[in-house]
Image: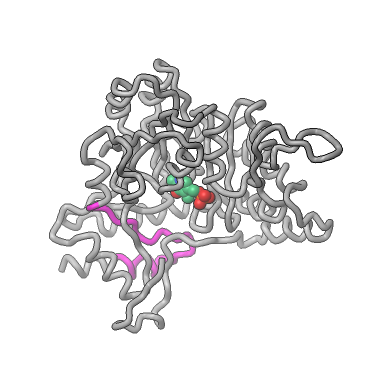
């Protein structure tokens, strides 16, 4: 996020990021990259890619994984692997980053946006049930686990099973989060993760698709390397993509995976710190943590029911060279997507209008956290 204050000179103040890349103190990432350099595996594919897939799948308790160039490409491949065809409808959580919905359009399919509930901030099972009644021929759904909170998966899975709907989990923000003791991303037919620069672990850019279906994961590896048939010459019977992760990028991922638990612990510490220091301010509510959810707290978010507005907080922080941002603007409110149907009420809109994501960078010190809190408390005094 850019800070662009012409009238305030904040560049001398220590910058605090919303969430920025944080390599391991031990230098694991460098070791894997150096190995790749020494063996000249500076190429798409290679031993780091194979190992990253296996290590990642083991870490989250999934059987198969395909390392891809981004979370977005992983969602795209999930839709294709699930069998989405042009004009098929796909139920899609409205409150999310646009990357959840864009691949539905790549496949010329039709998103039906679904509201969130206040209990989880994610897909409202009641709204999904209404949507199924309205569009009973729909065979696909994408649920998201925003900010590391998990959706209430049991009722969603029950509805999907009852109506023959293939569930895709967008777990781009929730690596390390569990729902009833099991990792998010391992409940649906397909789970999607992202290693973009601001995610809880990063490879600069990258993504992972996981599934219990070996054949589908192998198919995704095939499509994402240009659908090249096993011939001496280049033979193509299907449309191909250049979506594979490179061996260098995968080396960073292997190193980052080793310190995922540390990063989760720090993100949770940051959230608890804010809750303890700001929780008593009139009209502040922190994001909901349900007892069945062990969240990674990727970003610490709150909503305001107060004379102080999200913009007041964001402006005050920006003046001090500190990043923050609003909650995602729902897809059904986006000019590009507003022509598609939306099922639900105003929960996602309210979250967007009243919510703020506080800086949640794992490099933050206690002094940094105190600085953020005192700037915010000042607004209430
Ligand atoms: C980051 C993100 C993505 C996309 O991942 P990229 O790796 O940036 O393509 C998808 N969905 C959600 C909810 C995200 O936050």
Task: Determine the residue positioned at 69% across, 36% down.
Answer: 222
Q: Name the spot of residue 97 as percent of width and height, x first.
A: 40, 48
Side (left or right) of 274 relative to 178: left
Most foreground residue, 372 or 107: 107
Q: Name the spot of residue 160 as percent of width and height, x first.
A: 41, 22
Q: Quadrant of residue 4?
A: bottom left
Q: Name the spot of residue 299 as percent of width and height, x first.
A: 40, 53
| Colour scheme | one colour
Screen quadrant of the N terminus: bottom left
Most foreground residue, 88 or 28: 88
Most foreground residue, 287 or 279: 287
Screen quadrant of the C terminus: bottom left
Q: Is residue 177 visible?
A: no
Q: Name the spot of residue 231 as percent of width and height, x first.
A: 83, 34
Task: Determine the residue positioned at 59% across, 32% down.
Answer: 62
Q: Residue furthest right?
A: 232
Q: Quadrant of residue 320?
A: bottom left
Q: Residue furthest left?
A: 307
Q: Is residue 359 magenta?
A: yes
Is the residue 68 above or below the residue 311 in the image? above
Q: Is residue 360 magenta?
A: yes
Task: Determine the residue positioned at 41% across, 31% down.
Answer: 90
Question: Exactly how many numbered labels are in the figure?
Answer: 0
Q: Is residue 245 visible?
A: yes
The span picked out in magenta is 353-374
Side (left or right) of 231 relative to 111: right
Side (left or right) of 277 relative to 141: left
């Amino acid at each position: 996020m850019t800070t662009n204050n012409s009238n305030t000179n904040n560049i001398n103040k220590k910058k605090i990021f919303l969430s920025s890349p944080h390599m391991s103190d031990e230098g694991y990432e460098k070791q894997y990259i150096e190995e790749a350099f020494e063996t000249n595996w500076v190429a798409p594919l290679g031993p780091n890619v194979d190992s990253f897939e296996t290590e990642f799948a083991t870490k989250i308790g999934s059987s198969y994984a395909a390392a891809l160039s981004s979370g977005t490409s992983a969602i795209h491949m999930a839709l294709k692997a699930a069998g989405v065809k042009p004009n098929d409808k796909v139920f899609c959580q409205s409150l999310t980053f646009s990357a959840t919905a864009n691949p539905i359009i790549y496949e010329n399919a039709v998103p039906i946006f679904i509201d969130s509930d206040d209990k989880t901030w994610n897909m409202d099972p009641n709204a999904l049930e209404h949507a199924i009644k309205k569009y009973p021929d729909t065979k696909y759904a994408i649920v998201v686990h925003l900010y590391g909170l998990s959706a209430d998966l049991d009722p969603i899975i029950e509805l999907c099973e009852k109506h023959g709907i293939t569930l895709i989990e967008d777990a781009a923000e929730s690596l390390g989060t569990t729902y009833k003791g099991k990792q998010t991303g391992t409940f649906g037919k397909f789970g999607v993760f992202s290693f973009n620069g601001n995610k809880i672990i990063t490879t600069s850019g990258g993504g992972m698709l996981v599934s219990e279906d070996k054949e589908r994961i192998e198919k995704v590896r095939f499509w994402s390397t240009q659908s090249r048939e096993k011939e001496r010459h280049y033979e193509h019977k299907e449309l191909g993509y250049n979506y594979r992760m490179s061996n260098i990028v995968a080396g960073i991922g292997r190193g980052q995976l080793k310190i995922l638990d540390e990063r989760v612990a720090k993100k949770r510490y940051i959230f608890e710190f804010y809750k303890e220091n700001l929780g008593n301010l009139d009209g502040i509510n922190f994001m909901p943590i349900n007892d069945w959810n062990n969240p990674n707290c990727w970003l610490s978010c709150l909503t305001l029911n107060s004379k102080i507005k999200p913009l007041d907080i964001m402006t005050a922080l920006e003046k001090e060279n500190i990043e923050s941002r609003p909650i995602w603007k729902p897809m059904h409110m986006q000019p590009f997507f507003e022509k598609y149907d939306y099922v639900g009420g105003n929960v996602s809109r309210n979250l967007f209008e009243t919510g703020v994501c506080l800086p949640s960078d794992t490099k933050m010190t206690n002094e940094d956290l105190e600085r953020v809190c005192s700037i915010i408390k000042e607004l209430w005094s």
